[in-house]
Image (cartoon, rainbow, N blue to C red):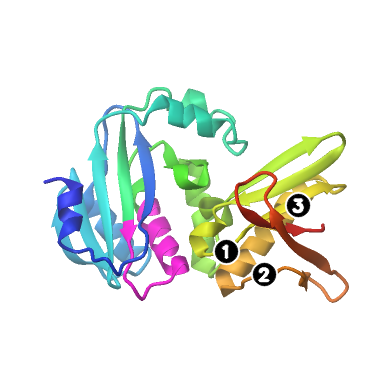
Amino acid sequence: MGILKLFKKKTTNNNPQPLLSMVMFDNNETFNLESVVKYLTDTWGQKIEEITGDDEASSFVINGNVLGIGTIPVQIPWEDITGTADYAYNWPTVLEDLKQHNSHLIVSVLGHKTSTALERYQLLTMVLTAILDTSNAVGVYQGSQSLLISRKQYLKSAEALKQNEIPVDLWVYIGLRSHLGKNSAYTYGLTWFSKLEMEIVDSNSSLDVLYNQLFDICAYIIGNDVTLKNGETMGTSIEEKIQITQSKGLFVEGQTLKLNC
C-alpha cells in the first residue's frame, strides 16, 4: 500500500502545510514500524493511535496529527545532495558518507488544524530519532531548510527536547559568510514557523559568536512564538540592545529582519 494512499483518507483541506524529512540508508535497509512505535511510547511518552501499514509504508496518529513513513528503495537524487552539501559545514564528510546510500524514507507530519508549528516540529523530531536510534540510518536530509544532518548530530541535538529546549540546528539552517574581513549570518527555515528570516550583515563579531547569537534568538522566538518587528530592539540583557530593521534579504529571498550585532 502506498504512503500517499494511507494519508488520503486522513487529511483535510483544513490541515497546515505538511512537514517533510528524509532518512538515508545504505544496503537497501529501512525502518521497523514496531520498533519505532515502541520507541515513541517508551522514550517520548507518546500515545500512538490508528496504526496502519507496515515497514514499507505506514501511518499513525499522535494527538490528532497524522505521521507517515514511506520507504523509497532508491538514492535521493545526487544533485539534491551535492547542492545542499555545499552548505553543510556541520557535516564535513557528508558526500563521502552518503555516496553509497541507496534507499531512503520520506517522513511526514500532516498536522491537525489546531496544532502549532512547534508541536509539529517536535513530533517530527521524535519520529526521526525513533527511526535513527532503532536502525542503521546514515543521516537526515531536509531540503526545505537546506539541512543535511548526520545520525550522531541529530540524536545528540534532539536531547534538547527532553529539557524543553529548542533544537534549532535540526529545524533551521544558520548560514555563515565571510567577506573582506567582515562576517555575516542568516537563517533559512523560520518561515515554516510563520516568522521572517533573520540576517546579520557585515559584523565585526566572529562566525562562532554570530552563530550562537542567531541560535539563541531562534530558540527564543520559536519557543515563545515571538514575532520581531521593524524598529524594535532586543537583547539578552538590560545593557544589550540589538536594533531590528526590515528590508529585502541579502542571503535569502524576500523580506528579512536585519539584526545590528
| Residue pointed to by mark 1 | 195
Residue that appears at 78% across and 37% down: 178
Magenta-span inclusion, residue 124: yes
Q: Amino acid at mark 2?
A: Leu
Q: As drawn, is 41 to the left or to the right of 214?
A: left
Q: As drawn, is 112 to the left or to the right of 257?
A: left
Cβ atoms at labels 2 and 1 below 8 Å apart: yes
- Magenta-drawn stretch, dominant element (helix, strand or loop): helix
Quadrant containing the C terminus is: bottom right
What residue range appears in magenta?
A: 109-129
| Residue pointed to by mark 3 | 200
Magenta-span inclusion, residue 112: yes
The answer for how far apart the CA atoms under marks 3 and 2 are is: 14 Å
Cβ atoms at labels 3 and 2 below 8 Å apart: no
91 and 233: which one is in front? 233
Q: Position of residue 3 (x, y in %)?
A: 19, 48
The answer for how far apart the CA atoms under marks 3 and 1 are is: 16 Å
